[in-house]
Amino acid sequence: MSVPEALLEPAIGSAFGSTAGSGVVDLDRVRQVLHREPALATMVLEDGVGDEELLPAAVLFPIVRRIAGPTVLLTQRTAHLKDHPGQISFPGGRREPTDTSPAHTALREAAEEIGLAAEHVEVAGYLPEYLTSTGFRVTPVVALVNPPFELQLDAFEVAEAFEVPLAFLLDSANHQQHSLHYRGRLRHYTAIPYREYFIWGATAGIILSLWRALAKG
């Protein structure tokens, strides 16, 4: 079986060269590799994507400006949810009829799920659409978040919100390859374990999309 694009990694140690050991990621460089508009012509296919019609969705990839180095704000979904219970995810969801753009969807969902106010968020750009095996066409909206800010979690959807150093997520030494049987076939995926959190699925795939863009320069 061929390995899907979402799992392929260039043969380099990290996405940011000699700065990997220092835990520093240049946010100006992150901006440079992002699309200025939603990248409808480019996409990353998750292993197992079929021919079914995909629902449009968007997630916020929130990079928090911290003095010690940028972090990524992630959530853990509550265990009782029908879709992806207990998994680590970006704030986001499917597009609503009143949403005017993927950024609108991502910002609205972030406000609803974790109470992140738009006044603290600066949209930096977009990563390629991410097509999931669960039926969604996801636009990742990368944004810079300016502290201080307060969060108000939706207790029905979100069990926890936490931050992971961006340098950790972009270091290929922390990327693990896994496989599982799903819908009658063997699927391959990448996971990024961090402390007690197991980051995988579309969340890890979107992180790898940024990793790949930075690696290509």
Image (spheres, rainbow, N blue to C red):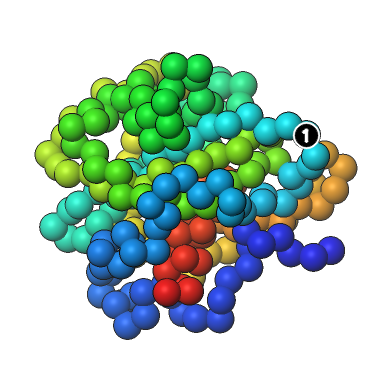
Q: Is residue 41 left or right of residue 18?
A: right
Quadrant, the N terminus: bottom right
Indicate the position of residue 7 as horizontal and vertical percent values. Answer: 63, 62
Q: Quadrant of residue 176?
A: bottom right
Q: Is residue 210 visible?
A: yes
- In the rendered image of this protein, does residue 204 appear above or below residue 82? below
Residue in view at x 67 percent, y 50 percent: 46
Q: Report the residue that reaches farthest toward the right.
A: 184
Q: Is residue 174 visible?
A: no
Indicate the position of residue 198 as horizontal and vertical percent values. Answer: 51, 48
Residue in view at x 38 percent, y 18 percent: 155
- In the rendered image of this protein, does residue 72 appear above or below residue 14? above
Q: Is residue 24 left or right of residue 208?
A: left
Give the crowd class for mark 1: few <14, some 14-19, many >=20 residues within 10 Å. Answer: few
Please state which amino acid type lies under the numbered disc 1: Glu
Indicate the position of residue 104 as horizontal and vertical percent values. Answer: 38, 29
Q: Which residue is mark 1?
A: 52
Quadrant, the C terminus: bottom left
Indicate the position of residue 97 as horizontal and vertical percent values. Answer: 50, 17
